[in-house]
Amino acid sequence: MDILLLTTFTAILFLLIAAAEPLAARLSIPFSVMLAAVGILIGGGAIFLLRTELTDTLNPIAESILSLPIRSSVFMYVFLPTLIFQATLEMNIRRMLDDWVPILTLAVVAVVAATLTIGYALSWIGGLPLMVGLLIGAIVSTTDPSAVVSIFRSLSAPKRLARIVEGESLLNDAAAIALFGLFMSYVMLGVPNPSLAEALGQFPALILGGVVAGWLVARIALVLMGMFARFETAQISVSVAVPYLAYIGAEQILGASGVIAVVAAGLVLNFMGPGRLAPAFWVNLREVWGLLAHWAGALIFILAALLIPRLLGEVRLNDLFLIGVVVIAAFVARALILFVLLPVLTGLRLSPKIKRPYRIAIMWGGLRGAVTLALALAVTESLRVPVETKRVVGILATGFTLFTLIVQGTTLRSVIGLLGLDKLSPLDRALSNQVVAVALQTVREGVASATENYDLTRETVRSEAKRFGARLDEAVERAEAEDNAEILDRDRITLGLIALAGHEREVILQRFRERAISARLSEQALFDADRLIEGARSGGRTGYQRAARSSLRYGPAFRFAAFLRNRLGLSGTLGRMTADRFEMLLAKRFILRDLHGFIDRRIRRIHGRRVAELLHELLNRRIEAVETALEGLRLQYPGYAEELERRFIRRTALRLEEREYTAMREDGLIGSEVYTQLMEDVTRRRQQTEGRPRLDLALRKNELVRQFKLFADLDDAELKRLSREVRTRYVNADHVITRKDTPARSVFFVASGAVEQEVAGQTTRLGRGEMFGQMGVLTTRLRRTEVRAITPTSLLVLDEPGFRRLLKRSAALRQAVRDSVMGKALAGDVLTMPELQVDAPALAAPAPDKAEAPEA
């Protein structure tokens, strides 16, 4: 095809893409449906012009359109990696992990179920070979949920539901294309027909190979992007190469799934990139990829739709029957997942509850599109696939795609309206009325102030004030209506908490844009804010508080990091996670304190004084919990919080300085040359503050040993010897340190944190500087206590021989042991031990009113 004609056609396609989006919005149909309609019209029009006898003038243009080099390889190797990679960059991985069960169920399990259902239906009813039916099932199992997601967003549907559908779309394509590659190899000429078990048995290898390839490419890309830190365009160029290298490497080198490789590469870059790349660059990177994906998605839809008239050129009556079989089988498989399996998972508390109307919308919104057509095209192009198989696959895949686009796509919004998903609940309507009334009152005050400042004509002001006053009176009347007055305080509290968490989210984004917090921590903070919103929506005050406590809890990752440090001596992971927690707690403390003003400015005016006071109380509890957690870390790592606070102050000062220079340039006080020089200086100093101070997890045994009053009478030589003998151990909250009826071989000293010990039904807490386990070591009997950490705790551990030697050297320790056994049944045996008799004659008897310590 002539390059000039190809360039002209490409430019026209971009104009059509630009016009399709506003036209789709005007007609209230999904954007993808409009793009498909444009492609079908172009392709069908070209065929009509060639075959009609009305005119031959436009035949060259029609022939050029039909001769476009549209091949499946263009879709699979050019457009598809872009779409999948951009989707992974936009994913909120932490939130997706919360819903991994329904996402995997709707994606992987649903794809396998749909493939098997359609394959066996075509084999039993349509008489097709099983492998051909399974191939068709894999092709039509790829869904394009962009339509239903966009509508859900416009209807303010639950974010969790939209997130589940988005996660399904990504993994759905990956699983379906992997299955397609598997079954495609078995329908080619000369390949023996395998059993279903043999075919599915190769599926895990395809997945694993793709994951390895994607992980490797992403890690190399991160290294390169770190080397090009000063050159943003170079970093973006590296990111553009990532999906294509991952796809080609997996397909051509490892013989694995290229789509899985792209997904893995995107997830690795999404998870690790924000912590290694500058925040501003990460924002720009996502914007660039968003534009690339928009173009790629639009082009793949139009170009694939161009092929529809050609693929349907040899349709027969029996083919229409087979298309109906595919449609029914696909809906049956989808219904089984949504209405049978998902409720079971919800009952097992493995999945959130999805209301029936939303499940119907998800089922009806499972449109097929460009990916399905691209896979069908790959089959029709293959020279090793039988001719009849190519014809059947092309017609059935294309016909099913047309059904979903024409029937489901054009009626999706109407179905959602019939389900009542586009209507506000009575509570939301009542809230909306009150919000409008409060907002208009604020607007009236602002308009009155503006008219005074600008000295407008009195008659104009009076007529507009009268008009606005009528609208305000109407809004107040609706807000004070009887149905609005019946809003329960419980509901007002829930709505207030949702608004408060939403404002917290906005503050986090603002702090991120101002570079007060890093991209990685902002993602974690946004993750916690989303949990607060969903917790308040589902559980009211209780759900909000549960989500707030969850954000401060030490999870499995912390426990695993502690295991690596304690057992393998690998402290890097624990150090990074602890430093992240330090920084997160400091950022949360600043953010939460700013929320009190929002309660007074906004929530009090809408929901009243009682609700505002309760929200103040709940917010104060959160602040207190954050302060407590932060204080625990301060005690454990003294000085590190101060370093982080200094860094925060420096970054805040730089932000304010940058703002001042920008304002001076806009006011014309400084020229562009001076402004550029000043900003370069600010950038240089900001790079110096970007690096976080290193957190030393070595616990510096020498310093910790010197902090114990029990060792205060030891000289420097003895302290050095003791620091060599003790071991450090870090445990998370709720970790059981010692159990009942176990041999006692060590004594523990609390360096930081707190522990709780239980003996004979009594519970005692021990804090920094105290010891436990000494009674079991001295008596050589089984432990009678269970000791559990109640906060993250650092311990010094000394074995029995070392403890006995230390008793002989430290008078303070000997006295502490004597005090701990006073009043115990075994006190006589313990006090007569040689280690405690070193200075016994010189010691007076213990005071009779000394508090009895429980046996440890």
Image (tube, grey):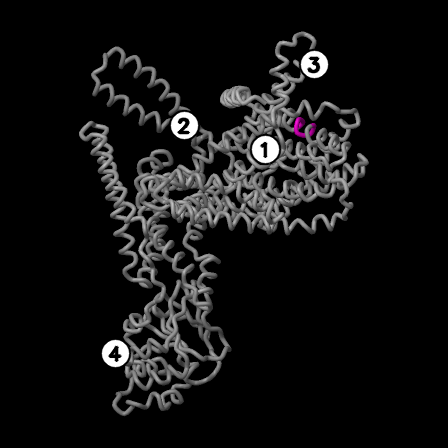
What residue type is disc 3 on?
Answer: Arg
Tag 1: amino acid = Val
Residue in front for this viewpoint, 715 or 485: 715
What is the magenta range?
399-403
Image position, residue 222 (x, y; %):
44, 48
The residue that disc 1 covers is 74
Q: Which residue is mark 3?
A: 51
Q: Position of residue 548 (x, y in %)?
A: 42, 50
The residue under label 2 is which amino acid type?
Ala
Percent across and percent down for residue 460 are: 27, 12
User: Residues at badges 4 and 2 in contact (C-beta under 8 Å)?
Assistant: no
Residue at numbered disc 2: 479
**Horizontal side of residue 669 vs 184, given as left or right:** left
Q: Position of residue 194 (x, y in %)?
A: 76, 47
Graded by Cα atoms within 10 Å as few (under 14), some (14 to 19) or many (20 or more), the crowding at tag 1 reads few
Q: Tag 4: residue type?
A: Asp
Q: Can you identify the residue that label 4 sits on?
A: 716
